[in-house]
Amino acid sequence: MISIKLINKKDIDICYELDSSTISLWSKRQWNDEYKKEGTKIFGLLLANLLIGICVFQVVLDEAQINYFVVKQEYRKRGFGSVLMIYLINQCEKLNIKRLLLEVSNSNETAKKFYSHFEFSTVGIRRSYYKDGSDAVLKEKKLTTK
């Protein structure tokens, strides 16, 4: 059974473990700092009781920025990321968010294709943004509010 839950403080260690086994974006301290930021929401995608995906987004006025989005490698390309993204979009629409923003490495073709499927359009580029020298592609999805 698939479920999505709001992550609370006690679950941050599980988020860090999943991050460490996938994209290794944040340290444990950064996870704790992210959790404390005003307007930040963290959702976990669970299969039975196993955390297989995480979405971190921050709401500022009528915009939201996706700061982290991942599904465990062995569960990718099976629709789980789409379930999490649809949930996120629905939550943003309920909050009257007008646009959803994110950045993705220009070298990450799989992620770029995934975001295009959800009608994110490219609105800018940050040259040599990542440690490996790749550019960050800035993407935006305009939302309809309910």
Image (cartoon, helix red, strand yellow):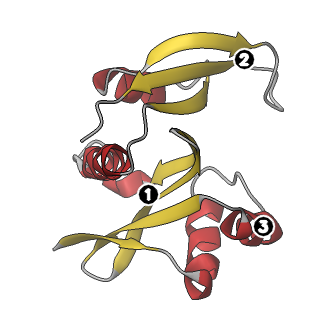
The residue at the point 42 percent across, 53 percent down is 71
The residue at the point 29 percent across, 24 percent down is 117
Q: Is residue 109 visible?
A: no
Give the label, 2 or 3, closer to the camera: 3
Residue 58 spot, x, y in % from top left: 59, 51
How many numbered dots are placed on residues in this image?
A: 3
Considering every residue shown, the one lying at the far bottom of the view is 10
Q: Tell me the kind of residue under disc 3.
A: Asp
Give the label, 2 or 1, closer to the camera: 2
Q: Assign a secondary structure to mark 3.
A: helix
Q: Assign a secondary structure to mark 1.
A: loop
Q: Assign a secondary structure to mark 2.
A: loop
Q: Looking at the picture, does residue 45 appear above or below residue 122? A: below
Q: Looking at the picture, does residue 130 appear above or below residue 73? A: above
Residue 122 spot, x, y in % from top left: 52, 12
Quadrant in which the C terminus appears? top left
The residue at the point 69 percent across, 12 percent down is 125
Circles 3 and 1, Cβ within 8 Å, touching? The answer is: no
Q: If you read the primary sequence from the N terminus, does the residue marked by circle 2 or circle 3 appear first?
A: 3
The residue at the point 61 percent across, 21 percent down is 138
Residue 51 spot, x, y in % from top left: 41, 72
Q: Looking at the picture, does residue 98 appear above or below residue 79? A: above
Q: Tell me the kind of residue under disc 2.
A: Asp
- Give the residue at mark 3: 33
- Give the residue at mark 1: 72
Residue 135's disc is: 2
Q: Quadrant of residue 128?
A: top right
Q: Quadrant of residue 30?
A: bottom right
Q: Quadrant of residue 133?
A: top right
